[in-house]
Image: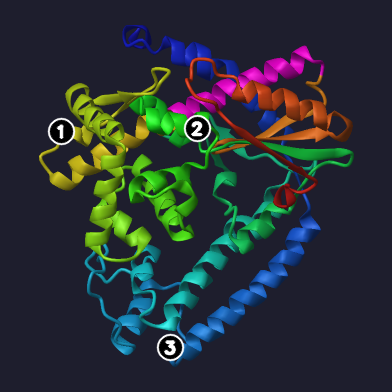
Amino acid sequence: MWLKKNGLQKVLNDIELPIVSIIEEAQNTGVLVDIPYLKKLSEEYHKKLTSLENKIWKLAGGEFNINSPKQMGEILFDKMGLSTKGLKKTAGGSRSTRESELVKLKGEHEIIEHILAYRELQKLLSTYIDNIPEMVGKDGRLHTTLNQTGTTTGRMSSVNPNMQNIPARNGLGEAIRSAFVAEKGHSFVAFDYSQIEMRILAVLAKDEKLINVFKEGKDVHSSVASFVFGVPEDKVTKDMRRKAKVINFGIIYGMGVNSLKANLGGTRREAQEFYDNYFKAFPKIAAYFDGVKKSANKKGFTETIFGRRRYFKGITSSIPYIRSMAERMAINAPVQGSAADIIKIAMKKADDRLKTEGLKDKAHLLLQIHDELIYEVEDEAVPKVKKIIKEAMEHFPDIELPLTVNVTSGKRWGDMK
């Protein structure tokens, strides 16, 4: 009754329910794991961990428990005298040594780099490298749990283990991905939406400049840099493009000037100028964000293109930081939520096409990672499956600009090309 009253039956009936069996099938199929590879990786990474431990102790002038926040604080702030200025405290009032705080000390002393590297390596070992072999089923496959409504925006999540959190570009994390292998006579084929959230923002904001960038197939970061810096596209430097990329991804998450400064480097004044120039170049995006905040304040929720809602309790809070946090989430929800809706709809469309073409038993969905679907496909069917799924994912007539899907394939997840 509540769903009908609030117009949410369409989200349930057209987006969520049609993929329940597809997700269940993906979980039951699981991903084949190369356990000897992981064992070897474990030995290698534990040696690196020991090496980092020794470097940290040497720089600290003695051994201590690196995993103890109390001892870490005493070493860094009392013994070594590193500044606590600008660092947050724990709920109990102690000096925090959380990663988010230690990152602020980068450059103060080389021990910080080693501590951060140690923690990252330890997390990869405990969460994935040493843990996954224990989780593999009798069939030699890892059956992660795909949570269909795992996030407040409608995005799916993955647990036991979280397959979405394995770093994609970091060398250490990339090596873990290579532990997942396709069955003999099969290949992995991945279909990844290109810059889908920027495309959705262009549609939601009805920004013709941004819409045309995608319609003309241009590089969005170079094009945005051209508008913001007021130079022709062929005069856009690497640094200009880098800055445009930071703000393109940042504004989707409601990034403010301080966050922009932290991500760009430079002064707050430069960040403010760049921020202002962005919204001068794209006034419709500024107007759209303003409209989202006002609407969320009035209604208490935001909606995706397809009508999915997200509610915000803190949007009318009298406490400024709670209200601004809710406003940032409100800006992001329609964009990220629409992307989540699209990939779920695409999942069903791809499944239907595979059935129609008689390829359902040759191509099996394994994972959904953010804006990407990963299948295990019989080798002889790969060319046909690539074409069918790419077409199904890109065909959205109700979206007024092209959706582009990048396709990669390989025998190991970490070697996709």
Q: CA distance from mark 1 to mark 2?
A: 36 Å
Q: Can residue 21 be seen in this snapshot? A: no
Amino acid type indicated by mark 2:
Phe
Q: Which residue is mark 1?
A: 316
SS at mark 1 in the image: helix
Q: Residue furthest bottom?
A: 61
Q: Earlier in the sequence, mark 3 or mark 2?
A: 3
Quadrant hosting residue 183: top right
Mark 3 sits on what residue?
Answer: 60
Q: Amino acid at mark 3?
A: Ala
Q: Earlier in the sequence, mark 1 or mark 2?
A: 2
Secondary element at tag 3: helix
Magenta stretch, main secondary structure class = helix
- Name which residue lies at 55% across and 36% down: 371
Query: What colouring style does the render use?
Result: rainbow
Figure check: 237 above or below 251: below
Q: Quadrant of residue 6?
A: top left
Kind of residue indicated by mark 1: Thr
Residue sitting at x 35%, y 36%: 332
Is 349 colored magenta in this rendering? yes
Q: Nearer the viewer, mark 3 or mark 2?
A: 2
Please report the bounds of the magenta region as a residue range. Answer: 338-358
Which label is found at residue 214? 2
Vertical order, 121 against 392 (above or below): below
Picture quadrant of residue 126: bottom right
Distance of label 3 from label 2 (alpha carbons) = 52 Å
Going from N to C along the chain, the mark reached first, 1 or 3, is 3
Question: In the image, is 125 to the left or to the right of 91?
Answer: right
